[in-house]
Amino acid sequence: MEDVIIIGGGICGCSLLYELSRYKLKVLLLEKENDVACGTSKANSAIVHAGYDPEPDTSMARFNVEGNILIERLCRDLDIMYKKTGSLVVGFGEEDRRSIEKLLEKGNKNRVPDLRIIEGEELFRLEPNLSREASCALYAPSAGIVCPWELASAQAECAVRGGAKVELDCEVRGIKKEGGGFTVTSGRGNYQSRFVVNAAGVDSDTVSRMVEPEFFAITPKSGEYFILDTTESNLVNTVVFPCPSKLGKGVLVAPTVHGNIIVGPDSKDFKRGDYATTAVGLEYVRRNALRSIPSINFRASIRNFSGLRADAGLEDFIVGESREAPGFFNIAAVKSPGLTSSPSIAREIAGQLNRSGLAFEPNPQFQAKRRVKRFRDMNEEERRAAIRENPLYGNIVCRCETVTEGEIIDALERPLPPRSLDALKRRCAPGMGRCQGGFCGSRVLALIARHFNLKPEDVPKDRRGMYIITGETKKGGAP
Ligand SMILES: Cc1cc2nc3c(=O)[nH]c(=O)nc-3n(C[C@H](O)[C@H](O)[C@H](O)COP(=O)(O)OP(=O)(O)OC[C@H]3O[C@@H](n4cnc5c(N)ncnc54)[C@H](O)[C@@H]3O)c2cc1C
C-alpha cells in the first residue's frame, strides 16, 4: 500500500513528488508516456511569470507570485538553467496604456515586486530592437526564463534518489475508492494507495471522472512557436509581450536559457494529443511578433512546435481535495502560469495531505540538491580537469551544443534514464542546436542502444512507436 499515488509526470506531478520526498513516505508517480515532462511541460514559453496577469485574490495569483520566488531557489539547488531577465508588456497608443495601467494595479494587488511603467529612452535602452511605435511598457524585473523539462526531470530524479518511485509507460485507466484508500488500475497492474493526486494535465478531467462526478471539462488550446538559432540571441534581452487580449497573453518574443529566441504562441481549440503545427497558426505568430520586434529574422528558425493548454474556461486552477471522494486531490486545469506556479502548488497540496492525516516525518535520504556537468559552460581549466577525470568528456558528440559523450553517459546512468532520443535531448541537450540532431542523431541513438543493450530499431525518437530505424535496407552489407 502506497501513501500517495501521483497520476501524471508533468511539472506539477514531479514538483509534488520532490516536495513529498522530504518526508518518510511511500510515494509512487504513474506516467503514461516513456518519460516525465512529455506533455505540456515540455512545450510552453518557459517563462517564470512575475504575476500581474492572474485576477487578484485567486489561488492562481498567490501560486504565481510565490512560485516565481521558489523557482529561483529550486534552480540554484538543482543546477537548472534559469535567468531573471525581467519582462515587458509593450503598449502602442492610449488604449494599450490604459490596459497596462490596469495590469500594474492588478500586479500591485498581487504583490508583484518592483513593477513599474517605463517609456522613451529607458524602454529602448532595455530593448533596442523594439518597434519605434511602442509608447510605453509594464516592466516586471522579477520575471525570468527557465528550462521547464529539466525542472521537472531534476525534481523527479532527486525524489527517486530519496526513495520515491516512478513508473513510466503506465497509463491509469481506473480508480476505485475502497475501504480506507483507493485501488488504481493501470496498463501495468493495480496499485493501492491511501491518497491519490490527479496531475494529469490536459487529461485531468478524464482522470477526475474516474472517481468523482464531472465538475469541469478541458478544451485543449494549442499554442504554436518558432525557435530561432543562437545567431539571433541578441534580438531581445527581456521577455517581450504585447498587451493581453481575450486569447491570452499574446505572442511573445523572448530569449531561452539555451541561447535561442522563442516566438509564439497563438491560441486555438485543438484535439487532445495533437501536437501538429499549422501554416495558419505559424503565420499568425509571425505577423503578431513583428509588430513588437520588426527585425525578427524568421529565416533563422530551426524548429517549430506546439503545446496544449489544459483550459477549463476558469479564472483559477483546480487545486485541492475532492468533495465527493475524500482522499482524492486534483491539480487540474493548470494552464499558464502553471509552470511558474508548480512549486507553490506542490507545497499547497503537501500541506493539504498533511492536514488530511498524512504524517510528515523528515526523510533522512531526502536529496535537496544535485549538480550536473555541462562541458559547454566550463572554462578551459575545468574542461581539462573533466577530461582527465573521464576521457569521454573529450569526445564531442553534438557539435552544435558542445555535448560530450561523458555527459550523455552520465545522463543515461542517472535515475529515470532517458530511453528515447528526445528524452536524452531533454536531459543534456544533444540535438537541440542548429542541425536538430541531423549530424549527431545516429551517434546518440547508437549510444542509447549500446548502453541499454537494445537493438537500434528499439530506440524511438520520442514517444513509444516513433521509431527512426525500422530495419536494414541492404541485407548482407555493401557489395
Ligand atoms: C502554449 C503554452 C504556453 C505556456 N507558457 C507558460 C509559461 O511561459 N509559463 C508558465 O508558467 N506556464 C506556461 N504554460 C502552462 C504550463 O506549461 C502548464 O501549466 C504546465 O506545464 C502544466 O503541467 P502539468 O504537470 O499540470 O501537465 P502536463 O505537463 O501535461 O503533465 C501531465 C502528465 O500526465 C500524464 N497523464 C495524462 N493522463 C494520464 C493517465 N491516465 N495515466 C498516467 N499519466 C497520465 C501525461 O502524459 C503528462 O505527462 C504554458 C502552456 C502552454 C500550452
Image: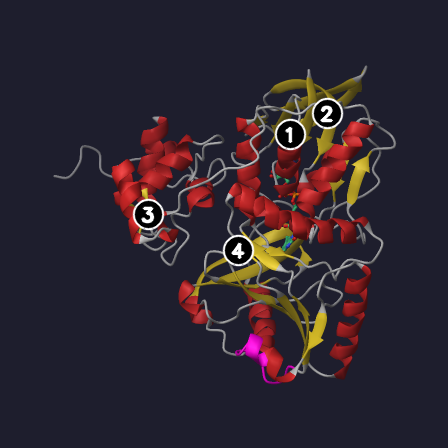
Element under disc 4 = strand
Mark 1 Cβ and ligand 1 under 8 Å apart: no
State how far apart marks 2 and 1 are (Cα).
9 Å
| Contact flag, marks 4 and 3 (Cβ < 8 Å) | no
Residue 110 seen from this side: yes
Q: Determine the quadrant in which ligand 1 lies.
A: top right
In this view, the residue in front, 317 or 370, is 370
Dot placed on the residue nearer the N-terminal end, 4 or 3: 4
State how far apart marks 2 and 4 are (Cα).
41 Å
Residue that badge 1 annotates: 22
Element under disc 3 = helix
What is the three-letter code of the residue carrying label 3? Glu
Residue that badge 4 annotates: 305
Mark 4 vs mark 1: in front: 1
State how far apart marks 3 and 2 are (Cα).
41 Å
Residue 344 figure quarter: top right
State how far apart marks 4 and 1 are (Cα).
35 Å
Task: Name the residue: 80% across, 70% down.
Answer: 102
